[in-house]
Image (cartoon, grey):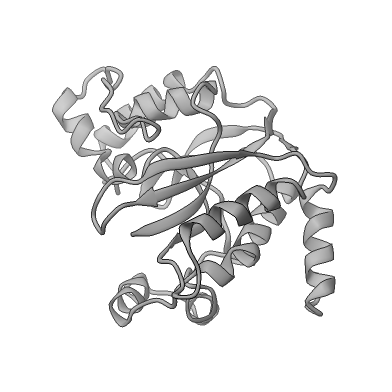
Amino acid sequence: MRYAIYFAADANAPLMQLGNTWLGRDPFTGSRLQQPSVPGLDPARFEDLTTSPRRYGFHGTLKAPFSLAKDTTEDALIAACTGFAKTVSPFNLKGLSVNQLGKFLALTPAQTEPDLEAFASLCVRQFEPFRAPLSAEDLDRRRQANLTPKQDAYVETWGYPYVFDEFRFHMTLSNKLEDNEEAVLLARSAETHFEAVTNSALTCRHFGLYVEPERGAAFDVLRIFELTGPQSPISALKNTLANSNEEVS
């Protein structure tokens, strides 16, 4: 069993509903959903091009999937999420837009989002005590991605290469795509599908705890937590770093 801390919202949020429909699965219920029509693309092909993000559930990674450390429990993790949510206040984003991220299609920030980056860094640190060390197999798998020396060091220390200054927020919408007409069709349709929630300000009020019951299974929402705390993510991160004697970058 693995867990993940994800950027997400409650089941009724338009962003989540559109994302779930696009991927063809509802991680709140585990049910399959009918995907939208992509003009010029066969429905079965669209399904094939979204298999990986469908399994993980619509989300943005904050703390990458991890197995629980031997000295902790799911109940303790839930309690930690509950307590964490009471320390950080909701924060605004300038907006998300559909973009190509490497070979993937994704929703990404339209501009730099310091609060979101600070929130992700907080999540990495806050929930690190719950993460079991990577197995040799998982470590080798991570290292197949041609990591930089810094990214490799992050994998060793934090279990994931894309944290802190290497973090790039994204909500994945496709598998790896070739640079061809399919990618163009998919991007155009995604822009239309998400137009109600893109390129405009939104408020982040929640994060999610997702669970993978067994390796290779689909990730489902275990619980959504509402941010109700007094501190902005940036202030909370500064306090966390100060208390741990780390330098604030």
Task: Give the residue at x 84% y 55%.
Answer: 235
Q: Residue at x 44, y 67 (%)?
A: 68
Quarter of image, res 242:
bottom right
Residue 22 seen in this snapshot = yes
Q: Nearer the viewer, residue 169 or 182?
A: 169
Please identify the quadrant where the C terminus is shown: bottom right
Which residue is at 45% across, 23% downward? 17
Is 86 positioned to the left or the right of 11 in the image?
right
Q: Quadrant of residue 50?
A: top left
Q: Is 72 or 164 nearer to us in this picture? A: 72
Identify the residue at image location x=37%, y=35%: 27
Where is residue 224 drawn, in percent x and y?
A: 55, 38
* In the image: residue 5, left or right of residue 112: left
149 w.r.t. 189: above or below: below
In the figure, 32 relative to 59: above or below? above
Q: Position of residue 146 (x, y in %)?
A: 38, 74
